[in-house]
Image: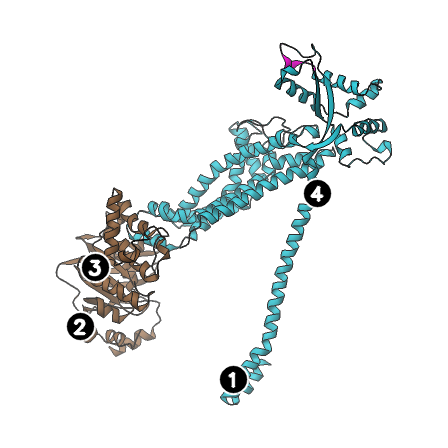
Chain colours: A cyan, B brown
């Protein structure tokens, strides 16, 4: 159709031809704008979809997890009579017994052995440790009556948070009617309340949900990341600089480049198997440790860092290199004085993205034994440790209801770390970025 | 000769294998600073420069003119081995500087480029302060040791480049923040900060406005008293204004060399005449 109009226009005079062109343009103009509008709509829709999914994820995690930041405590009056505390070695006194005695004193009507066991079950086994810490901190407490807020058992905690319903039949409840009654007494006397859960941020893993904390995993992740960063940053940058600035372009370097790109696509569990075979079995390094975990994650992070760094180096305008070479600088001086400072923001961004990836990595660490149940907070690179994603995996696997909210809370902590790392990347890029 | 022109202009610019054409005019000068003999440059198989021989005299400005793609920039970049950065490029023939072939295996390019400086087509100051732009090269060569030495070199180089008065109060500001003409003069200051013997200029004014161009041209005239300058230019007016000798390149051949006056008033080769009168190129 357009063709015929054009042909018709060709025969007429100059002015009418000009009108014709405008007509043709106008005719299509509407369609062009429609296309643009549609394209923008698609873009908007996809952004809205991703935002919706993100919001869904965040609300579900936060909704499940925020309760883990609170923990139910019970106020217990503990009579510390003279002689209960071992004078020579106060830490070795029978605190469990003292706590039980205090519980019995509060519920004098409970005499049956079975009932007593049910009664003791309302309190966390951590209560004895709390008492021990209090006494060790202040030995003068001996001989007095201490009012102590002790940890409640996770079932009580779940009841207080509404995850155990009081109105379901007794047989389907983890707390029986007697126990509910005892809790009712505590509630009536305002001896039970939810407080900020410091344990979660200071303790290592535990079989008891109320005693389990993320701190061990945070520290394990920290040491692991430190090893990864210390190894992968210098190695990655050096490899990228050499490949980009010094290496001759030949088959060998092409081969290396292809393989680096391949490595970036290798499933991470393969790196774990490699770590198991090489670092644990061949070199005999200790298993479950941040040292080995860090090395394995370094292998995984290296390709990312190298690829990002090479892209950053490529983006440095060649005119800067020529300028420096033109005044007689050596290649190394060109790189250190001009190319590296310009490429650094991109390299840092790549590194932090690689580190964030490594921080969230689970599969390779399972292979080198970091999936073990580790209660102690690691104190160094060769202590057995858990890392955050593995901790999440372990808690998600645990049957207790209280671990559900802890899983979500741990995810929140991990996300907070990831977000702050990415924010750091943005800040660094802005800070080091220079115009040329 | 007419026939040659027809044949050449009919030929596409991909330089097919052929004999080089003979250069018209006197390629020799008395007491030359650089001597180029039978220089051939190849990019892989493609030959970009054919058998070029020319002298560059002391304290003279040699202008290289020619249509786009004639190889004049390639030839200029051979003079301080900037072509080394291009992997596919290789050079045969001799380029003598201080009686030594600069392509000799024993020659180190680092000191060579300190003696033969370069100013590029597009102003390319380092993304650092004006001061650092000038002081960096003397620093890496160890020419300056103290801060006061560096200050002195920065001031004298900027003065020689005619930029001192404009920037003396803002030496700590980025060189990239200057105007195009100022940036190019900063690049000239950077080149002369290491006291080179020869300065190569690759179309230094092509990105500049007429006023900035005039300033650079005045500067070239002044620099001639101390340095040897080889300049590639697309502007025939510029060549006639700043140079003493002119070389006309065409499709990789050096067609004609002579004093600027002769080339622009009585060119011997038909191609030269066509080019300078604007009929070709």
Residue under pointer 2: B262
Residue B56 appears left or right of A78: left
B196 is within the stretch colored magenta = no
Residue under pointer 4: A63
User: CA gap, disc 1 to disc 3?
Assistant: 57 Å
Q: What is the chain letter for disc 1?
A: A
Q: Please name which of the two marks, 4 or 3, marks the residue nearer to the observer.
A: 4
Secondary structure beneath label 3: helix
- For residue B251, say whether it is visible: no
Residue A18: assigned label:
1
Q: Are marks 4 and 2 on the same chain?
A: no
Vertical placement of residue B135 versus A188, above or below? below
Question: Which quadrant: the N terminus of chain B?
Answer: bottom left
Secondary structure beneath label 2: helix
Contact (Cβ within 8 Å) of mark 4 with mark 1: no
Q: Residues within 10 Å of mark 3 (few under 14, many from 20)?
A: some
User: CA gap, disc 3 to disc 2?
Assistant: 23 Å
Contact (Cβ within 8 Å) of mark 2 with mark 1: no
Q: What is the chain letter for disc 4?
A: A
Secondary structure beneath label 4: helix
Q: Are marks 1 and 3 on the same chain?
A: no
User: CA gap, disc 4 to disc 2?
Assistant: 88 Å
Q: Position of residue A22 (x, y in %)?
A: 54, 81
The magenta segment is: A87-94
Residue under pointer 3: B223
- Mark nearer the N terminus (4 vs 1): 1
- For residue A322, say whether it is visible: yes
Q: Residues within 10 Å of mark 2 (few under 14, many from 20)?
A: some
Question: Which quadrant: the C terminus of chain B?
Answer: bottom left
């Amino acid at each position: 159709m357009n063709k015929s109009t054009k042909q018709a226009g060709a025969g007429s005079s100059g002015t009418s031809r000009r009108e014709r062109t405008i007509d043709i343009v106008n005719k299509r103009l509407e369609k062009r704008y429609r296309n643009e509008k549609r394209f923008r709509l698609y873009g908007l829709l996809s952004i809205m979809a991703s935002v919706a999914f993100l919001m869904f994820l965040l609300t579900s995690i936060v909704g499940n997890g925020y309760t883990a930041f609170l923990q139910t405590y019970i106020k217990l009056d503990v009579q510390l009579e003279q002689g209960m505390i071992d004078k020579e070695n106060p830490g070795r006194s029978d605190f469990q017994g003292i706590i039980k005695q205090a519980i019995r004193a509060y519920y004098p009507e409970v005499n049956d052995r079975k009932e007593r066991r049910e009664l003791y079950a309302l309190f966390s086994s951590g209560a004895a440790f709390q008492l021990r810490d209090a006494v060790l901190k202040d030995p003068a407490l001996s001989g007095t009556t201490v009012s102590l807020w002790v940890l409640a058992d996770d079932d009580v905690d779940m009841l207080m948070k509404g995850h155990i319903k009081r109105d379901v039949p007794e047989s389907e409840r983890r707390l029986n009617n007697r126990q509910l009654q005892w809790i009712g007494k505590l509630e009536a006397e305002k001896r039970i309340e939810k407080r900020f859960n410091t344990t979660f941020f200071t303790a290592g893993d535990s079989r008891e949900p109320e005693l389990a904390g993320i701190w061990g995993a945070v520290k394990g992740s920290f040491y692991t990341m430190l090893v990864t960063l210390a190894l992968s940053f210098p190695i990655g940058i050096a490899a990228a600089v050499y490949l980009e600035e010094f290496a001759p372009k030949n088959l060998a370097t092409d081969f290396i480049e292809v393989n680096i790109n391949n490595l970036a696509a290798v499933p991470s569990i393969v790196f774990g198997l490699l770590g198991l075979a090489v670092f644990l079995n061949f070199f005999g390094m200790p298993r479950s440790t941040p040292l080995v975990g860090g090395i394995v994650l370094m292998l995984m992070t290296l390709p990312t860092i190298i690829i990002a760094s090479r892209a950053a180096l490529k983006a440095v305008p060649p005119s800067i290199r020529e300028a420096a070479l033109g005044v007689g600088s050596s290649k190394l001086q060109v790189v250190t004085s001009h190319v590296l400072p310009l490429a650094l923001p991109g390299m840092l961004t790549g590194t932090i993205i690689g580190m964030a990836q490594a921080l969230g990595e689970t599969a390779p660490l399972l292979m080198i034994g970091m999936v073990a149940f580790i209660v102690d907070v690691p104190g160094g690179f060769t202590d057995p440790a858990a890392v955050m994603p593995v901790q999440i995996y372990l808690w998600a696997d645990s049957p207790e209801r209280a671990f559900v909210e802890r899983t979500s809370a741990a995810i929140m902590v991990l996300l907070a770390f990831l977000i702050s790392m990415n924010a750091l990347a943005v800040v660094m890029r802005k800070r080091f970025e220079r115009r040329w | 000769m007419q026939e040659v022109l027809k044949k050449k202009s009919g030929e596409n610019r991909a330089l097919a294998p052929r004999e080089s054409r003979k250069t018209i005019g006197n390629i020799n000068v008395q007491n030359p600073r650089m001597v180029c003999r039978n220089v051939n440059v190849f990019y892989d198989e493609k030959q970009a420069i054919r058998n070029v021989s020319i002298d560059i005299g002391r304290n003279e400005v040699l202008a290289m003119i020619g249509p786009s793609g004639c190889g004049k920039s390639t030839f200029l970049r051979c003079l301080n081995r900037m072509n080394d950065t291009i992997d596919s490029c290789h050079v045969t023939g001799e380029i003598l500087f201080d009686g030594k072939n600069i392509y000799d295996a024993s020659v180190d390019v680092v000191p060579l480029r300190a003696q033969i400086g370069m100013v590029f087509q597009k102003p390319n100051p380092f993304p650092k302060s004006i001061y650092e732009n000038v002081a960096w090269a003397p620093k890496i060569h160890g020419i300056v040791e103290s801060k006061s030495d560096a200050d002195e070199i920065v001031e004298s180089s900027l003065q020689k480049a005619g930029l001192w008065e404009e920037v003396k109060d803002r030496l700590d500001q980025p060189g990239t923040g200057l105007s195009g003409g100022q940036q190019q003069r900063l690049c000239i200051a950077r080149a002369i900060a290491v006291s080179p013997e020869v300065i190569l200029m690759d179309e230094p004014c092509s990105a500049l406005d007429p006023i900035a161009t005039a300033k650079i041209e005045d500067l070239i005239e002044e620099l001639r008293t101390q340095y040897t300058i080889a300049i590639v230019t697309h502007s025939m007016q510029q060549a006639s204004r700043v140079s003493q000798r002119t070389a006309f390149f065409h499709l990789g051949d050096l067609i004609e060399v002579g004093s600027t006056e002769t080339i622009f008033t009585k060119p011997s080769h038909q191609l030269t005449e066509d080019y300078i009168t604007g009929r070709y190129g």
